[in-house]
Image (cartoon, helix red, strand yellow):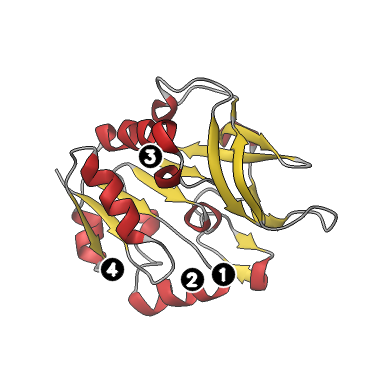
Amino acid sequence: MKIAIIDYKAGNTASIKNAVENLGFSCIITNNPEEILKADGVIFPGQGRAGQAMKNLKEMGIDKILSRITKPFLGICLGMQLLADSSEEDNTKCLSIVGGKCIKFPAELKTPQIGWNKVNFIQPSPITEEIKNGSYFYFANSYYIEVENKYIVGKTDYGINFSSIIQKDNYFAIQFHPEKSGTVGSQLLNNFCKLC
């Protein structure tokens, strides 16, 4: 069993790899579309700006294969936001995997939101098993994804209530950083890896 961590020059892939391997799972960091499609699971981390990230994905030919993945898929932070149809950041056309739109927090809120915040579970999901409702995770975001309610697993309050965990079929996505979220972050990653 091998999990592919996508390297598109927009994510802290090394820390995700360490976190996955510390849980006892095998993973590779790759930007090879064939390796990504062959993997037993895919992690799509992300930091930085939506426009540059989509440019990188297109140059590597990764943008065209992400919607074809049938194995468990986990988008993290920017990797969650890019699953929308579009993002207000850089007025970017995104991957259209979960639909919806990525929106900037209202101007009166300090951005980025950096630090620990609570996630309230709206509905059950395999990636939140054995995690207490209302647990705190580590966030660093200025944007959030607005998506259909049926896909929202968890919500977080930062001046507004926004979706912080979503699931559509085999696609899971989280707005926070599990590798920086202590034991609850490790539990969530472990739950995901066990699906692969």
Whether residue 76 is situated above or below residue 118 in the rendered picture: below
Query: Which residue, given by chain and number where applicable, does mark 3 sit on?
Result: 170
Crowd tier of the residue under label 2, counting other residues whose Cα lies within 10 Å: few below 14, some 14–19, many 20 or above: many
Crowd tier of the residue under label 1, counting other residues whose Cα lies within 10 Å: few below 14, some 14–19, many 20 or above: some
Query: Which residue, given by chain and number where applicable, does mark 1 sit on?
Result: 49
Q: Earlier in the sequence, mark 4 or mark 3?
A: 4
Kind of residue at badge 2: Ala
Q: Earlier in the sequence, mark 4 or mark 2?
A: 4
Secondary structure under tag 2 reads helix
Secondary structure under tag 1 reads loop
Q: CA distance from mark 4 to mark 2?
A: 13 Å
Q: Are marks 1 and 2 in contact (CB under 8 Å)?
A: yes
Residue 77: percent from left, percent from top: 51, 53
Question: Viewer-nearest of labels 1 and 4?
Answer: 1
Kind of residue at badge 3: Asn
Whether residue 75 is situated above or below residue 47 in the rendered picture: above
Q: Residue at x 39, y 32 (%)?
A: 183
Q: Earlier in the sequence, mark 3 or mark 1?
A: 1
Query: Which residue, given by chain and number where applicable, does mark 2 sit on?
Result: 53
Q: Are marks 3 and 2 in contact (CB under 8 Å)?
A: no
Crowd tier of the residue under label 4, counting other residues whose Cα lies within 10 Å: few below 14, some 14–19, many 20 or above: some
Looking at the picture, tell me which residue is in the foreground, 96 or 180: 180
Kind of residue at badge 1: Arg
Looking at the picture, tell me which residue is in the foreground, 37 or 82: 82
Query: Which residue, given by chain and number where applicable, does mark 4 sit on?
Result: 31
